């Protein structure tokens, strides 16, 4: 729920999600037309999200003068310079809040540049505060990519697209499970999507979403190019089976022969994890994916999320029917307040949840540690299950006991801003 | 050209500084009038770098709100912040979007209406985000807060204020603790520390001190100290105790203000020199002779650049090749920068990330001192040795309390830290592989030959050699855009050997 105020809202900037999506495309440069520190903030966040890969995320030096006269002259010079120096195949201009406020229209400029540089593709993404939910920035970026797709009357009978973020294993798993269907395009994938893949995306017979923000591009592709899509996310047992069923119905091809490959392993993990509680407030639009996998592993699951689009309806039903709790909450502060009253064995979330996990003696998994866990289908359940099973009797319990005994828990969760109260006083006095 | 029109910024803007000040204070809630994304970047970066929960409020602006009145959201946010968290002070600040739609005066008028409903002080600090950087934001916040709250007080004998320690600045805790240790050892009383851990009361009693000590005088706090001097006659000192000489100078300067403590100060200088100075000399005779004259690069704010230059160049005998000042040149340091320029150091002000990568590739310093951004840049420039010292801190840990950069103890710590990096540097066997990125296109044999040759070059000058060869090849290929052949590579290698070091 977007309210008029939030103590510590969970969502990042939509421009971040848009830029992050573009960085997953080979030979593509995200250009940020926004205030100068937006590039810095984005860069720091994306660098970590990309695990240290060198990135190039230039941005306009948007100053007061530009806010009156517009920054088109600057952006034109910048884009021409980048094309000459970096030779990108795709230039994605992401519009931040400032240019959106003054209505800086870059479309005519991009059309002109596309005419001059036919070997470069240009797209503009309206991110900034234009989208209602932050994670929709990624959806906007994927939607903009549909503009460079080549419309074709010839569809490959036996192929499908994966729309959303997909890691290498996830792609391979889909390839195996949906045989004899083949992957046509994966937009976008961790190893980097090729531009050709995006261009030929409309050749696929069906689109499969991998994240909640896939809804925007899926609808766009359906409405404009009549490519059908699966209306459920492939996480958790029942939703994954539903995906298989929908794919079979649409394509008329029998798939899913290797569906139960790890059924026994998952059963064993389920035994181990029975009765354990997990709190998920992960952001990045992965809460539903992770929660479905947790439910499939028999965990008592509590989810706090802000964005529940229609595409996740079946998954939400699956979570609720199996005893999971879903709360719509954007505020980290409120989530922490609620989390304080309950006991958890695992907490998955932003780094601000780590002190809460220590207080509960729970094992904490950050966004980086769960990078491979929202893999679709049975593989995802297995991955997550194995990670959690290892941490059932975690060393965090020892610290909880020690900290309680010696009164070591300072108010780090709510930050009482008292640096002297953090144990430094004795040093000062000595 | 690129710096003029587009760049990858290396320092955040003023609203970050203002929020940092508010979040450093006790029972103070910042309210950001802007989109939630801006707000989240600020909070997320503080949570990560300070390893502590921070919570604030935002008016959570959407594009649609601009069409109507966005001020309703702000007013409700202020009231709810008061009801929910019962703070003693609320600081309202702005981001670039809100600055486009509302001036400072309009914002003040809007807040005036809320003041009737909320019985605590609400201070409006207009960000001026499109122009000002984080340090200017901190300076502005400090000045406004002190102007608003400082009250005439009775002087307390032998007492000082410390102005400047603030969350979000690298190593502020350790540096503050070292400063406090030095001051308390002389017998001085600390009257107020602003803004870290300060409440409104701390701001009010600022004029009770006999002297103001500035932690970062060349970047922020000076305007506030000048105000205190003008209004209440409290003098201030700008000497920053970095390195042996300046620490002694700092303590000697205290003698002028507190002649009754002269004996204590003399004793402290003697003790510091005997313990930390002696410790430093013990280490200098092995390590510093080895690393003396090695080229290094520092990136940070004016105070840090000045201070670290004192330690690294004068105490530890390193050679400063690159000084990257994250903010504008401080006129008080013009003489210092001129002197460094004469010595052959390259000084860049407000550099973009691209400029940093280029300058590092060109000069190939053996250790880079900087922030998370320079860490990324040094990785791109293939410089493996890095020591974090400045902002943005992001994923570096800045909470370790025993590692100050200040005082004679700071020089001793830095020497150990550099020595650790030196060992890594000397025994680095990293090899260039085929995955190495090249700006030019090579024929297979040519690339293989070039990689083989570069792998024979010691790691600490490899990036410089690579940069020189690439530049020569670029000139040779010029506009033909053909692939680089084996002959070209052999020629470039020979030519690069003829190049004289700059």
Image: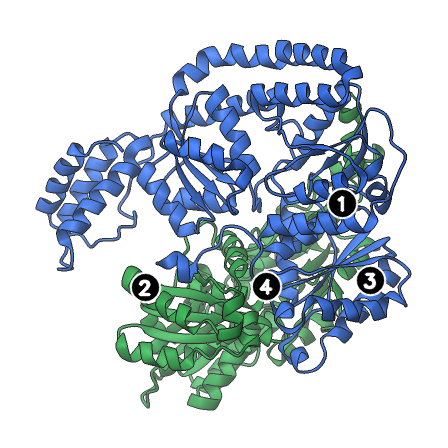
The label number, if any, that marks residue A412 in the structure image: 1
Q: CA distance from mark 3 to mark 2?
A: 47 Å
Q: CA distance from mark 2 to mark 4?
A: 33 Å
Disc 2 and disc 4 on one polypeptide chain:
yes
Residue A203 image offset from top left, x and y in percent: 35, 82
Q: Nearer the viewer, mark 3 or mark 1?
A: 3
Camera-nearest residue between A379 and A136:
A136
- Chain A colour in the picture: green
> Pointer 4: residues within 10 angstroms few (<14), some, or many (20+)?
many
> Pointer 3: residues within 10 angstroms few (<14), some, or many (20+)?
many
> Which residue position holds label 4?
A284
Say what secondary structure mark 3 lies in.
helix
Q: Nearer the viewer, mark 2 or mark 4?
A: 2
> Which residue position holds label 2?
A81
Q: In the picture shown, does residue B405 fall above or below A227? A: above
Residue B446 image offset from top left, x and y in percent: 14, 46
Give the letter of the blue chain: B
Which quadrant of the figure contains the C terminus of chain B?
top left
> Pointer 1: residues within 10 angstroms few (<14), some, or many (20+)?
many
The label number, if any, that marks residue A375 in the structure image: none
Residue B444 image offset from top left, x and y in percent: 16, 50
Upstream in sequence: badge 4 or badge 1: 4
Instruction: Write down the chain letter for disc 1.
Output: A
Q: Residue at x 49, y 79 (%)?
A: A217
The label number, if any, that marks residue B81 in the structure image: 3
Camera-nearest residue between A178 and A375:
A375
Q: Residue at x 60, y 69 (%)?
A: A134
């Amino acid at each position: 729920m977007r309210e008029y105020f939030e103590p510590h809202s969970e969502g990042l900037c939509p421009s971040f999600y848009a830029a992050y999506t573009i960085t997953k495309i080979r030979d593509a440069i995200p250009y940020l037309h926004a205030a100068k520190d937006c590039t810095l903030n984005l860069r720091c966040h994306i660098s970590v999200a990309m695990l240290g890969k060198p990135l190039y995320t230039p941005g306009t030096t948007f100053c007061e003068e530009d806010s009156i006269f517009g920054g088109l002259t600057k952006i034109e010079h910048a884009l021409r310079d980048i094309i000459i120096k970096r030779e990108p195949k795709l230039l994605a201009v992401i519009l931040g809040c400032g240019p959106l406020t003054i209505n800086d229209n870059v479309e005519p400029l991009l059309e002109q540049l596309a005419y001059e540089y036919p070997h470069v593709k240009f797209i503009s993404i309206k991110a900034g505060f234009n989208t209602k939910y932050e994670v929709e920035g990624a959806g906007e970026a994927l939607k903009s990519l549909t503009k460079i797709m080549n419309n074709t009357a010839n569809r490959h009978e036996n192929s499908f697209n994966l729309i959303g973020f997909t890691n290498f294993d996830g792609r391979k798993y889909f390839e195996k499970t949906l045989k004899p269907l083949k992957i046509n395009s994966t937009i976008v994938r961790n190893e980097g999507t090729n531009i050709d893949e995006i261009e030929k995306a409309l050749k696929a017979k069906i689109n499969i979403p991998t994240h909640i923000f896939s809804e925007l591009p899926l609808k766009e592709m359906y409405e404009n190019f009549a490519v059908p899509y699966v209306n459920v996310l492939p996480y958790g047992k029942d939703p994954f089976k539903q995906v298989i069923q929908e794919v079979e119905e649409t394509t008329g091809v029998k798939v899913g022969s290797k569906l139960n490959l790890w059924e026994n392993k998952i059963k064993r993990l389920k035994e181990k994890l029975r009765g354990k509680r997990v709190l998920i407030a992960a952001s990045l639009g992965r809460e539903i994916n992770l929660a479905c996998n947790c439910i499939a592993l028999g965990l008592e699951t509590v989810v706090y999320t802000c964005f529940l689009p229609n595409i996740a309806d079946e998954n939400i039903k699956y979570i609720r029917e199996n005893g999971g709790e879903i709360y719509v909450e954007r505020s980290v502060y409120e989530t922490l307040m609620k989390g304080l009253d309950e006991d958890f064995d695992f907490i998955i979330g932003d780094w601000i949840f780590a002190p809460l996990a220590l207080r509960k003696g729970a094992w904490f998994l950050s966004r980086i540690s769960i990078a491979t866990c929202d893999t679709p289908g049975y593989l995802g359940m297995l991955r997550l299950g194995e990670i959690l099973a290892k941490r059932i009797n975690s060393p965090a319990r020892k610290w909880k006991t020690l900290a309680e005994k010696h009164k070591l828990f300072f108010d780090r969760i709510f930050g009482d801003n008292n640096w002297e109260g953090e144990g430094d006083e004795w040093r000062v006095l000595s | 050209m690129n710096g003029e029109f587009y760049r990858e910024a290396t320092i955040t803007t003023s609203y970050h500084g203002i929020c940092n000040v508010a979040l450093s204070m006790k029972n103070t809630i910042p309210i950001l009038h802007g989109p939630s994304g801006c707000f989240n970047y600020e909070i997320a970066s503080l949570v990560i770098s300070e390893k502590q929960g921070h919570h604030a409020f935002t008016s959570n602006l959407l594009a649609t709100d601009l069409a109507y009145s966005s001020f309703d959201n702000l007013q409700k946010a202020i009231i709810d912040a008061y009801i929910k968290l019962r703070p003693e002070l609320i600081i309202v600040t702005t981001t670039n979007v809100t600055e486009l739609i509302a001036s400072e005066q309009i914002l003040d008028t809007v807040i005036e209406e809320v003041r009737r409903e909320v019985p605590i002080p609400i201070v409006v600090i207009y960000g001026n985000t499109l122009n000002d950087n984080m340090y200017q934001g901190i300076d502005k916040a400090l000045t406004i807060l002190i102007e608003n709250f400082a009250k005439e007080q009775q002087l307390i004998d032998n007492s000082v204020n410390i102005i400047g320690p603030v969350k979000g600045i690298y190593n502020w805790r350790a540096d503050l603790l070292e400063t406090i240790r030095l001051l308390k050892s002389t017998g001085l009383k600390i009257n107020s520390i602003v803004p870290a851990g300060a409440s409104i009361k701390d701001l009010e009693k600022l004029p009770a001190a006999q002297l103001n000590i500035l932690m970062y005088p060349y970047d922020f706090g000076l305007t506030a100290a000048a105000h205190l001097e003008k209004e209440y006659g409290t003098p201030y000192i700008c000497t920053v105790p970095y390195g042996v000489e300046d620490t002694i100078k700092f303590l000697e300067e205290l003698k002028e203000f507190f002649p009754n403590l002269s004996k204590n100060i003399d004793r402290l200088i003697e003790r510091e020199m005997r313990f930390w100075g002696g410790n430093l000399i013990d280490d200098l005779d092995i390590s510093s002779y080895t690393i003396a004259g090695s080229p290094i690069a520092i990136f940070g704010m004016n105070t840090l650049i000045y201070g670290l230059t004192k330690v690294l160049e004068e105490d530890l005998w390193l050679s400063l090749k690159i000084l990257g000042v994250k903010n504008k040149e401080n006129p008080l340091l013009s003489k210092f920068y001129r002197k460094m320029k004469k010595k052959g150091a390259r000084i860049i002000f407000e550099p973009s990330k691209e400029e940093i990568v280029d300058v590092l590739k060109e000069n190939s310093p053996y250790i880079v001192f900087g922030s998370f951004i320079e860490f990324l840049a040094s990785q791109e420039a293939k410089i493996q040795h890095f020591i974090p010292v400045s902002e943005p801190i992001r994923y570096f840990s800045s909470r370790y309390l025993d590692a100050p950069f200040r005082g004679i103890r700071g020089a001793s710590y830095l020497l150990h830290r550099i020595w650790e990096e030196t060992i890594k540097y000397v025994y680095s066997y990293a090899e260039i592989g085929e995955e190495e990125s090249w700006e030019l296109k090579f024929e297979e044999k040519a690339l293989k030959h070039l990689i083989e040759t570069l792998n024979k070059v010691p790691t600490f000058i490899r990036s410089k050699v690579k940069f020189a060869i690439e530049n020569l090849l670029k000139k040779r290929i010029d506009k033909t855009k053909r692939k680089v052949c084996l002959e070209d590579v052999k020629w470039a290698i020979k030519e690069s050997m003829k190049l004289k070091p700059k």
